[in-house]
């Protein structure tokens, strides 16, 4: 089968100016082709530039490097054949369902009769017949999101870009809507020839897509790709689907940009520390130690059991791996020997082990500790470290990384932080008492 290219991105880059005026690369060297007949899912951490990429593809914002083509033509502005569904419902509250759906057609100068007929058709397609006259506030969240999708479909787009279209909905409603869309897609009643779906949910991506792309952050770019050829509808509990979900977890558990979480990664001072709070990490490690896991778990199962989302669990998995409290391989997480000691230990032992691992494996923490030890007062302003970090990341990211380092440092009792003064200091018991001037 010959697959026609619909949208083609080459070396696409985009920077935004932050508040202090410095440009920050959000996307860099993004190469991506969307073909006729495929559904592609895009996964990546929050802030990695997924929405920005979709906006560029829809022609809503320009890229500032590289080449973006729709059907071979450079894209300069909103493309007629491309429609986007936003995460939030973005409906006009004072317009009825019918009027909201017609909006997109009005902008295209389509006469009223035709508008009405086409809107009705789209509303029916998406399962909202009978609600044409309703106002958004009279609808449930799931129905409102259906209106958003009908509004995108009414223009009969070739390409449908969905930016977390299901994530604001409760789980069951999201699943229903996703299944309905896949059914429409499979039945050929929808004019759409290709879909790009941004998701925060790994299972959703695997159930929907022909290809799953994993985005790296800072700057955003395509890190890896997984092809899925299991026919739809896919059974979420089938062996094939579970194996693929594991594979995507494995692709997503990385401690360093672009590298899978194999051991023996040389850490560096300016590593972006995963945003994992220590209390949740403690909870997850305890859970991992218990039945039925007994120290080793399939990540998706651990997500389920911990009642955390992928977004919450992945940073914890990455952080515990960075600290060598766990090992990650092939979508599995397992306690290391130190990790087992940690879980079995008293609170005091946990803090101590954590602190040791921290100094050993997280160079930023070791650097902070070492710098404080050099100071007679045992303290330094946080700006001192922010400045160091901001050489290799923007100010916002530097603050985030330092905040994580401080939280981990406090838990591991290797340094303290005073929220009132912004000073980082050695724990009291580690400060050498000043030598008494012995006056005779
Ligand atoms: N108009 C803008 N001006 C300045 N910065 C922006 C703008 N739009 C996005 N950004 C920044 O670009 C980065 C990427 O944002 P984007 O919304 O594309 O990420 P995302 O991957 O969609 O994240 P999420 O998963 O949270 O939706 C973020 O750091 C964001 O703050
Ligand atoms: Mg987004």
Image: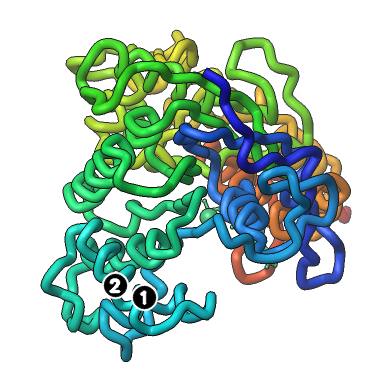
Q: In percent of the image, x 33 and y 59: which residue is there?
A: 168
Under tag 2, what secondary structure?
A: helix
Q: Is residue 323 visible?
A: no
Seen as rendered, the residue at the extreme bottom is 94
Q: Is residue 192 left or right of residue 379?
A: left
Query: Are dots 2 and 1 in contact, CB under 8 Å?
Result: yes
State the image coordinates of residue 373 (x, y, percent, origin top left): 79, 40
Would you place residue 128 above or below residue 103 in this image? above
State the image coordinates of residue 208 (x, y, percent, origin top left): 36, 33
> Closest to the observer: 51 or 350?
51
Would you place residue 112 above or below residue 51 in this image? below
| Label of residue 141 in the image | none
Q: Is residue 86 visible?
A: yes
**Protein image colouring:** rainbow
Q: Mark 1 points at which residue?
A: 114
State the image coordinates of residue 214 (x, y, percent, origin top left): 56, 32
Q: Name the residue under label 2.
A: 117
Under tag 1, what secondary structure?
A: helix
């Amino acid at each position: 089968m010959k697959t026609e290219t619909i949208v083609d991105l080459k070396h696409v880059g985009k920077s935004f100016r932050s508040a202090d005026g410095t440009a920050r690369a959000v996307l860099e060297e993004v190469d991506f082709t969307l073909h006729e007949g495929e559904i592609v899912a895009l996964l990546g951490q929050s802030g990695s530039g997924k929405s920005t990429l979709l906006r560029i593809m829809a022609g809503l914002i320009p890229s500032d490097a590289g080449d973006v083509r729709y059907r071979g033509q450079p894209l300069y502005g909103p493309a007629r054949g491309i429609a986007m569904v936003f995460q939030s419902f973005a409906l006009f509250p004072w317009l009825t369902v019918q009027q909201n759906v017609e909006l997109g057609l009005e902008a295209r100068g389509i006469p009223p009769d035709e508008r009405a007929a086409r809107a009705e058709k789209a509303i029916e397609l998406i399962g909202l017949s009978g609600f044409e006259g309703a106002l958004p506030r009279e609808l449930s969240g799931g129905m409102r999101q259906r209106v958003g999708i009908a509004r995108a479909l009414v223009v009969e787009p070739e390409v449908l870009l969905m930016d977390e279209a299901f994530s604001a909905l409760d789980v069951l409603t999201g699943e229903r809507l996703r299944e309905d869309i896949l059914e429409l897609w499979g039945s050929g009643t929808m004019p759409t020839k290709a879909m790009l779906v941004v998701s925060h949910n790994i299972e959703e991506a695997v159930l929907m897509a022909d290809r799953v792309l994993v985005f790296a952050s800072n700057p955003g770019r395509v890190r890896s790709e997984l092809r899925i050829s299991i026919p739809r509808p896919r059974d979420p509990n089938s062996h094939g689907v579970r194996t693929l979900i594991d594979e995507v977890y494995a692709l997503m558990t990385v401690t360093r940009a672009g590298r899978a979480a194999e051991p023996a990664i040389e850490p560096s001072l300016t590593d972006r520390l995963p945003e994992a709070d220590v209390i949740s990490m403690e909870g997850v490690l305890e859970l991992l130690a218990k039945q039925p896991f007994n120290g080793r778990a399939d990540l998706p199962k651990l997500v389920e059991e911990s009642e955390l989302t992928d977004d919450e669990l992945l940073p914890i998995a990455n952080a515990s791996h960075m600290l060598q409290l766990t090992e990650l391989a092939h979508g599995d997480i397992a306690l290391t020997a130190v990790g087992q000691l940690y879980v079995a230990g008293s609170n005091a032992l946990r803090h101590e082990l954590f602190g040791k691992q921290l100094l050993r494996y997280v160079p930023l923490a070791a650097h902070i500790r070492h710098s404080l030890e050099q100071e007679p007062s045992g303290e330094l302003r946080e700006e001192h470290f922010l400045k160091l970090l901001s050489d290799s990341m923007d100010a916002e990211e530097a603050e985030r990384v330092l905040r994580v380092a401080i939280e981990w440092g406090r838990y591991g009792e290797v340094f303290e932080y005073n929220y009132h003064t912004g000073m980082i200091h050695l724990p009291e018991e580690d400060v050498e008492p000043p030598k008494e001037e012995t006056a005779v």
